[in-house]
Amino acid sequence: MAAILKSYNKFVLRYPLIAMSLTTGTTMGLGNVISQTAIEKRTLKTVDWARVSRFAAFGYLFSGPFLRYWYYGLDKYFAGAKLKPVKMMITDQIIAAPLLNSVVLLYLPLSSGKSMTEAKKRFREDFPTVMKANYSAWPVIQLTNFYFIPIQHRVLFVNICSLVWSTFLAFVTK
């Protein structure tokens, strides 16, 4: 296990965008598989792999890159600030949380062939539930992240926590 962590650390320091995009897409896809098998009681043969792919693609192409630059930007913006982790968490929850949740809630139905009208309808139905759940969990996760986790591992830490979140999102947006 130590060798894996050492290799990951070297990789994330050398290629932060690629590493963070890969871990985000992978954990989002895995969260979708968990949702379909554990909550929806599908077998691996009946998993909707296109749905898994859409979730993973969102992580690889949008969420992972966004989080890489967001966390580094927050760290730089609040450098030297008193209560830096608290300010970072508040900023994250005011800006990034609604942004990422909005984008994923619109992306998923649109990428599955739904119309913009249908996507907006689903957004209006799901956004309050998603944000309520977000604000009950993510402020504590992000405070932990900003207080204790080195910047190069923040996306990985959030990805680990996101397994449960991605499972929840996959269930809500199915």
Image (spheres, rainbow, N blue to C red):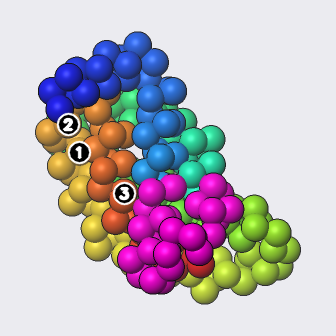
Q: Position of residue 50 (x, y in %)?
A: 68, 62
Say if mark 1 contacts mark 2, CB within 8 Å: yes
User: Which mark identifies residue 145?
Assistant: 1
- Of the two numbered discs 3 and 2 on the same chain, state the one appearing first in sequence: 2
Q: Quadrant of the C terminus?
A: bottom right
Q: Position of residue 151 (x, y in %)?
A: 29, 29
Q: CA distance from mark 3 to mark 2?
A: 15 Å
Q: Amino acid at mark 1?
A: Asn
Q: Where on the picture, by quarter, is residue 104?
A: bottom right
Q: Position of residue 40 (x, y in %)?
A: 48, 83
The local secondary structure at tag 2 comes to loop
Q: CA distance from mark 3 to mark 1?
A: 13 Å
Q: How many residues crowd mark 1 within 10 Å: few (<14), some (14–19), many (20+)?
A: many
Q: Which residues are magenta?
A: 29-54
- Of the two numbered discs 3 and 1 on the same chain, state the one appearing first in sequence: 1
Q: Position of residue 66 (x, y in %)?
A: 53, 40
Seen in the image, is 90 located left or right of residue 15?
Answer: left
